[in-house]
């Protein structure tokens, strides 16, 4: 089976840089994946993407060496199993609040006897190659998002759930959980303290830890902080920032700054 190189790096304590896709377009997905990102995540939760779009975007990403990951809309086993069958090599599951919820997500990623994933890797086996059925349990990454008040309170029990490969921090939802405005790249000391607590808990327990970033500055900051995976940015963010910069220059710096969405 094709190796999950991003997961291998996290397990060794290394670092990776990824890209987030929120636009339903196979061409932009392929173009960004070929730039050299370690992993690329297709966002089915907040992105402008549905499952039909995913069936075109995953093959496009597969023309590169980037590990294909999907953020599912919710912790629903059938959603997790369906994106894995389409060829995702990892799932990011939002708003995990407890060990029981983490266990549910993990079980959906693993074939019996380790889980309850139904067998039918219609495209996954084509992408993964010979040995997929026997090796998928060790290659598919299950990543829980810790971003709610309950998730923070139950941090230790979530992180130590057997079979969990990674934790991904959604800083905007984390800010909401802390009673703050939903700012992604957040310099509030209380927010920073919770982010560091999550990172340290994961590292101490041998679980990969990542965080969503909306700028180069924060991606570099969290890499220096020893996060295992960071998002450098999103397709929509790269497009909007580049266009805004050039338009502002063409108009002598008078362009209207775009609304910040965390993407």
Image: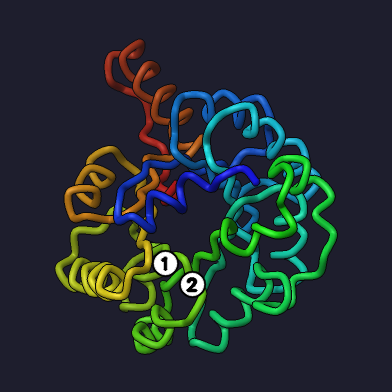
Colour option used? rainbow
Residue 167's label in the rendered image is: 1
Residue 251's label in the rendered image is: none
Q: In this view, does 137 lie to the left or right of 11?
A: right
> Residue 180's image quarter?
bottom left
Who's the residue at 33% across and 59% down the image?
183
Q: Which of 168 and 205 is in front in this view?
A: 205
Q: In this view, does 193 lie to the left or right of 258?
A: left
Element type where label 2 sits in the image: loop
Indicate the position of residue 159 as horizontal and vertical percent values.
39, 78
Q: Are marks 2 and 1 in contact (CB under 8 Å)?
A: yes
Element type where label 1 sits in the image: strand
Indicate the position of residue 45 as horizontal and vertical percent values.
61, 59
How many numbered badges does the structure rendering display? 2
Q: How crowded is mark 1: few (under 14 residues within 10 Å), some or many (20 or more)?
A: many
Q: In this view, does 5 lie above or below 173?
A: above
Callout in the foreground (2, 1): 2
Q: In this view, does 177 lie above or below 61?
A: below
Indicate the position of residue 54 as horizontal and vertical percent values.
73, 44
Who's the residue at 42% across and 73% down the image?
146
What's the distance in space between the residues labelled 2 and 1, CA to CA?
8 Å
Q: Is residue 260 left or right of residue 127?
A: left
> Residue 107's image quarter?
bottom right
Who's the residue at 74% across and 71% down the image?
117
Q: How crowded is mark 2: few (under 14 residues within 10 Å), some or many (20 or more)?
A: many
Indicate the position of residue 122 as horizontal and vertical percent values.
84, 50
Who's the residue at 49% across and 42% down the image?
39
Residue that sits furthest to the left in the current view: 189
Q: Mark 2 points at which residue?
A: 164
Q: In this view, does 74 lie above or below 13?
A: below
Q: Nearer the viewer, residue 261 or 248?
A: 261
């Amino acid at each position: 089976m094709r190796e999950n190189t991003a997961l291998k790096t996290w397990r060794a304590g290394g670092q990776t840089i990824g890209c987030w896709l929120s636009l339903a377009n196979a061409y932009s997905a392929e173009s960004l994946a070929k730039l050299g990102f370690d992993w690329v995540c297709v966002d089915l939760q907040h992105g402008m993407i549905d499952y039909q779009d995913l069936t075109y975007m995953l093959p496009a990403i597969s023309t590169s060496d980037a590990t294909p990951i999907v953020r599912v809309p919710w912790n629903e086993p059938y959603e997790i199993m369906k994106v894995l069958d389409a060829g995702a090599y990892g799932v990011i599951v939002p708003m995990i609040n407890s060990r029981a919820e983490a266990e549910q997500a993990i079980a959906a990623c693993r074939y019996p006897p380790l889980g309850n994933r139904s067998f039918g890797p219609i495209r996954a086996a084509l992408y993964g190659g010979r040995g997929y059925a026997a090796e998928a349990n060790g290659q598919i990454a299950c990543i829980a998002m810790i971003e709610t008040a309950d998730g923070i309170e139950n941090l230790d029990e979530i992180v130590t759930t057997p079979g969990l490969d990674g934790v991904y921090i959604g800083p905007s939802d984390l800010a909401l959980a802390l009673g703050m405005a939903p700012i992604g790249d957040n310099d509030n000391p209380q927010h920073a303290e919770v982010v560091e607590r999550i990172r340290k808990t994961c590292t101490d327990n041998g679980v990969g830890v990542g965080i969503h970033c909306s700028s180069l500055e924060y991606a570099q900051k969290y890499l220096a902080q020893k996060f295992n995976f960071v998002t450098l940015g999103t397709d929509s963010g790269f497009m909007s920032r580049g266009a805004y910069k050039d338009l502002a220059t063409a108009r002598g710096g008078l362009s209207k700054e775009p609304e910040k969405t965390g993407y």
